[in-house]
């Protein structure tokens, strides 16, 4: 993958760019992410806040406490409703982009599946990706 990448919403009003490679890519199967995406999981692309630029558009926000008590802030395009990013209150200097918002979603390569206890039975998890019952924490 090239070092910089970009993305945006369905209507084109929101555009963003990132100046460094993601530090994390993974699938979250928690019920909150399932509801937020309307799908089986959130294909998440983690980047440092300093590497993220909102180039155009307005973001709307929805906030909700996570199962661990931190505020989860989900940003979306106010025009078309496309999900763009998430800020986890536990790590406010980090941005988690929705892989579907990438201009080239083919760069997405998940490193792990988290909250697999909430994974839907019809979702076939890739057998070679490590699985975790909760959020992955580095030791």
Image (cartoon, rainbow, N blue to C red):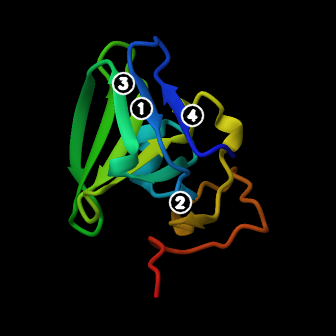
Q: Nearer the viewer, mark 3 or mark 4?
A: 3
Mark 2 or mark 4: which comes first in sequence?
2
Q: State the SS at label 3.
A: strand
Q: Determine contact: label 1, label 4, CB under 8 Å.
A: yes
Mark 1 or mark 4: which comes first in sequence?
1
Q: Residues within 10 Å of mark 4 (few under 14, many from 20)?
A: many
Residue tagged 2: 24
Q: Determine contact: label 1, label 2, CB under 8 Å.
A: no
Q: Nearer the viewer, mark 2 or mark 3?
A: 3
Q: Is residue 125 above or below residue 117?
A: above
Q: Is residue 63 above or below residue 70?
A: above
User: Which residue: 47% across, 54% down?
Assistant: 46
User: Which residue: 31% across, 41% down?
Assistant: 74
Residue tagged 4: 100
Q: Nearer the viewer, mark 1 or mark 2?
A: 2
Mark 2 or mark 3: which comes first in sequence?
2
- The spot of residue 88 in percent (x, y) is 30, 56
Residue tagged 3: 55
Q: Determine contact: label 3, label 4, CB under 8 Å.
A: no
What is the distance, in whole Å, between disc 3 and disc 4 at their CAs?
18 Å
Q: State the SS at label 1.
A: strand
Mark 3 or mark 4: which comes first in sequence?
3
Residue tagged 1: 83
What is the distance, in whole Å, between disc 2 and disc 3 at their CAs?
22 Å
What is the distance, in whole Å, between disc 2 and disc 4 at their CAs?
15 Å
User: Which residue: 33% across, 13% down?
Assistant: 79
Q: Nearer the viewer, mark 1 or mark 3?
A: 3
What is the distance, in whole Å, between disc 1 and disc 2 at their CAs?
18 Å
């Amino acid at each position: 993958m090239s070092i910089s990448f970009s993305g945006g919403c369905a209507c084109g009003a929101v555009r963003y760019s990132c100046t460094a490679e993601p530090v994390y890519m993974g699938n979250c199967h928690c019920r909150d992410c399932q509801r937020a995406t309307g799908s089986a999981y959130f294909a998440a692309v983690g980047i440092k806040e300093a590497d993220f630029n909102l180039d155009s558009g307005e973001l709307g926000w929805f906030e909700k406490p996570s199962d661990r008590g931190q505020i989860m802030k989900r940003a979306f395009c106010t025009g078309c409703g496309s999900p763009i990013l998430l800020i986890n209150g536990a790590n406010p200097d980090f941005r988690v982009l929705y892989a579907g918002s990438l201009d080239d979603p083919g760069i997405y390569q998940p490193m792990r599946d988290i909250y697999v206890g909430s994974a839907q039975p019809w979702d076939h998890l890739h057998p070679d990706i490590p699985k975790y019952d909760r959020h992955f924490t580095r030791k």
